[in-house]
Image (cartoon, coloured by chain):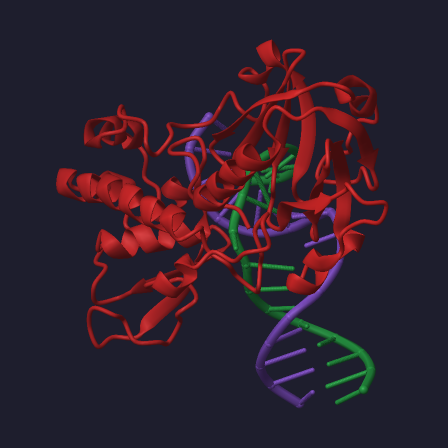
Chain colours: A red, B purple, C green
Amino acid sequence: MPELPEVEIAVRTLKKKIIHKQITNVIIKNPKLRYKINPIIKLKIKNKKIIQIKRRSKYILISLSDDSTLLVHLGMTGRFYFNNNNKKKMDVSIYSKTNILPKHDHFILKLNKINLIYNDIRKFGFIKLYKKKDLVDSEHIKNLGIEPFDKKLNYKFLKNKIKNKNLAIKSFLMDQKNICGLGNIYANEILFFSKIHPLKKTNQLSDYELKMIIYNLRRVLNSAIKQGGSTIKNYYNSEGNTGSYQSYFKVYGREKMKCFSCENNISKINISNRASFFCQKCQRH
DNA sequence: CGGGACTCCTGAGGGC
DNA sequence: TGCCCTCAGGAGTCCC
């Protein structure tokens, strides 16, 4: 599910449901995710309390009472959902309500009255445990770029970042070392609102265009968060609900359909191996 | 070093 | 119906 808005929604739901709860047991059903789940995790986190849940880029950081942090990335299809474990039998109503298949459950945290289940069809996500002090220097976190809502992100910051870079702006936006949290959907949408062709080179962008990119990325992300994220292919979030930002897509997935701003049809091209959607007339080089 | 192609994995959908 | 191909919200690795 996951670009920044979807991860943010997941974090907010986790906060609501599992903060302050104690981990009474851990079940690793299938350790083979992007990185093999280290079985030692089970012993290390059992009986610890969940004291804080945060988002950094597209990562979920679950801090535990012994100064360790579970670092979770959802990959393409990772998601958390909950199950009531108060009864003897698992509550299976969520399976009929959503398209979740238990065969893709890989990791389960048993908490007081509730199970937190990590489900991931394609297994591109991962779960790692770090000591809190090692987390920021970890390979996953240390090279991350600026957060989209960080006040330090302004056009001068971007201008400095793209200095000497002769790279398609779409690729720049997708690279987490620059601005983090954006993925394929939102990069496409942001460039449409900014009226910039996705292949336009970073060193060709005007100050005005850089300002538009920053303005629109915040606008698009905020709006998506407000809508509960985007749901593709009946993808359900942690509470068995779908986000609805997909109905606001201006270009993503709209190849050959009419542009909402002009009479042109939306084009689709490949940039860095990812589908890129744009309007040839509204978005100029 | 920067940047593009390839890779991991499963499932959905289209064409024949 | 079945088979084969392509594609999918990510990002690390390899190679030039």
Which residue is painted at 42% across and 34% down in the image? A180
Image quadrant assignment for residue A107: top right
Compared with A104, A66 (above or below) is: above
- On the rendered structure, is A11 left or right of A267? right
Which residue is painted at 57% across and 64% down in the image? A234
Q: Nearer the viewer, residue A56 or A285?
A: A56
Q: Residue furthest front?
A: A87
Q: Nearer the viewer, residue A195 or A26?
A: A26
Compared with A236, A68 (above or below) is: above
Image x and y of residue A96, in percent: 70, 64
Image quadrant assignment for residue A267: bottom left
Image x and y of residue A125, in percent: 65, 41
Residue A169 in view: no
Image x and y of residue A73, in percent: 60, 36
Image x and y of residue A241, in percent: 54, 56
- On the rendered structure, is A22 left or right of A202? right
- On the rendered structure, is A24 left or right of C11? right
Which residue is painted at 55% across and 15% down in the image? A137
Q: Nearer the viewer, residue A213 or A59?
A: A59
Q: Quadrant of the C terminus of chain A?
A: bottom left
Numbered circles on residues, count:
0
Which residue is painted at 28% across and 57% down in the image? A192
Image quadrant assignment for residue A148: top left
Residue A189 in view: yes
